[in-house]
Image (spheres, helix red, strand yellow):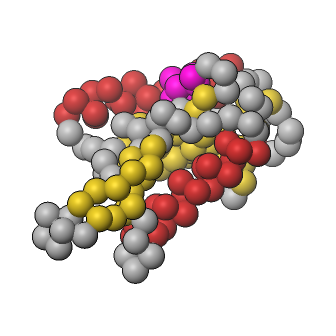
Amino acid sequence: MIATHDTDRSRTHAVVYLRSLAPSVIDETRDHLSRLESLVEEGSLLGYEVELWGDAISCDPTYPAGRELCETVERFERWAEDRGCSLEPGFSRGEICSLVSEETHDVIRPPMVCLAVYEGETLAAVYPHRDGSTRTVADGLADLERRNASDPIVAEV
């Protein structure tokens, strides 16, 4: 559910994170991106970005790209914790073994598609999440579409 708390909706923007650019994923997300584009065109959303994060994010502190993505997921986890909900099963943590060095590495396995909504620099909502029931990316888009066009969002769980 998205609740309103601010009156400056011009700062509301979204980031869509994709696990892959494979045709099956793109086909699945085409509708999501179209809906976001419609929200931008009608002025309900300032804009959106699409980022690729792969099927496993290395949390190795010596790897800057992985560290940045891990920090993003950790922000998502804090958002969920502050609201008494969970990002699982969409996000999971585990280990993988390197085929090159045979070392194990801690990784985060992200969902196929994730939607993060921001009010300015403040994280307002993350989809998917679980708050008794699973709230999908499609649910997040529906929440954005339902809200009063003059109301920015802060997710309420």
Does residue 93 appear left or right of residue 98 in this picture?
A: right
Does residue 101 appear left or right of residue 144 in this picture?
A: left
Residue 47 picture location, percent across and down: 56, 46
Residue 137 falls within the magenta-colored stretch: yes
Can residue 46 be seen from the camera position used here? no
- Determine the residue positioned at 48% across, 67% down: 68
Residue 12 picture location, percent across and down: 68, 45
Does residue 109 appear left or right of residue 37 in this picture?
A: left
Q: Quadrant of residue 152?
A: top right
- Observer-nearest of 104 and 123: 104
Q: Quadrant of residue 131?
A: top right
- Determine the residue positioned at 60% across, 49% down: 76
Q: Which residues are magenta?
A: 134-140
Can residue 35 be seen from the camera position used here? yes
- Observer-nearest of 85 and 9: 85
Residue 75 falls within the magenta-colored stretch: no
Residue 118 picture location, percent across and down: 66, 48
> Is 145 placed above or below 13 here?
above
- Determine the residue positioned at 19% across, 34% down: 23
Q: Quadrant of residue 31?
A: top left
